Image: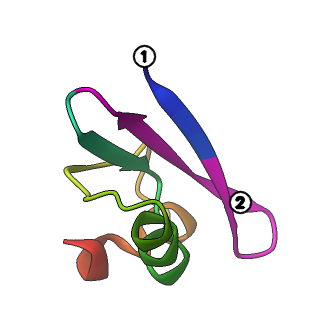
């Protein structure tokens, strides 16, 4: 079963966290900021396996470098 979470970022965006607990795999979608994602992952004891971007705007890719 896939668990989906929303993390609010910036003023009007969300990062989506997709977690498959049985496979212990986690992806984030459109991480415009890294720190909120890092805090969420640490709080929920998840490791990041994939970063997915829907398009190349700063508010969707701004956290990629730090998360990699």
Give the residue at x 43% y 38%. Answer: 18
Q: Position of residue 23 (x, y in %)?
A: 20, 29
- Quarter of the image with the C terminus is bottom left
* Label drawn at residue 67: none
Report if residue 47 lies within the magenta region: no
Pick out the residue farthest to the top.
Answer: 1
- Quarter of the image with the N terminus is top left
Residue nearer the viewer, 61 or 5: 5
CA gap between label 1 and label 2 equals: 25 Å
Give the residue at x 31% y 70%. Answer: 64
Q: Magenta part mainly helix, strand or loop?
A: strand
**Apparent side of residue 49 relative to residue 13 in the rendered image (left or right):** left
Relative to 1, say whether 65 is above or below: below
Element type where label 1 sits in the image: loop
Relative to 35, say whether 49 is above or below: above
Mark 1 crowd level (few <14, some 14–19, many ≥20, 10 Å Cα): few
Q: Position of residue 56 (x, y in %)?
A: 41, 57
Q: Position of residue 21 (x, y in %)?
A: 33, 33
Q: Which residue is mark 2?
A: 13
**Apparent side of residue 36 relative to residue 24 in the rendered image (left or right):** right
Relative to 48, say whether 34 is above or below: below
Write the start and end of the magenta stretch as one range.
6-22
Give the residue at x 48% y 69%. Answer: 37
Mark 1 and mark 2 residues within 8 Å of each other at the beta carbon: no
User: Would you identify the image quadrant in which residue 9 lies?
Assistant: bottom right
Residue nearer the viewer, 2 or 28: 2
Q: How many marks?
A: 2
Q: Which residue is mark 1?
A: 1
Mark 2 crowd level (few <14, some 14–19, many ≥20, 10 Å Cα): some
User: Would you identify the image quadrant in which residue 13 lies?
Assistant: bottom right
């Amino acid at each position: 079963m896939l668990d989906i979470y929303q993390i609010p970022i910036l003023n009007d965006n969300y990062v989506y966290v997709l977690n498959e607990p049985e496979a212990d795999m986690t992806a984030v979608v459109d991480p415009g900021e890294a720190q909120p994602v890092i805090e969420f992952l640490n709080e929920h004891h998840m490791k990041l396996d994939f970063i997915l971007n829907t398009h190349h705007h700063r508010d969707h890719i701004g956290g990629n470098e730090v998360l990699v």
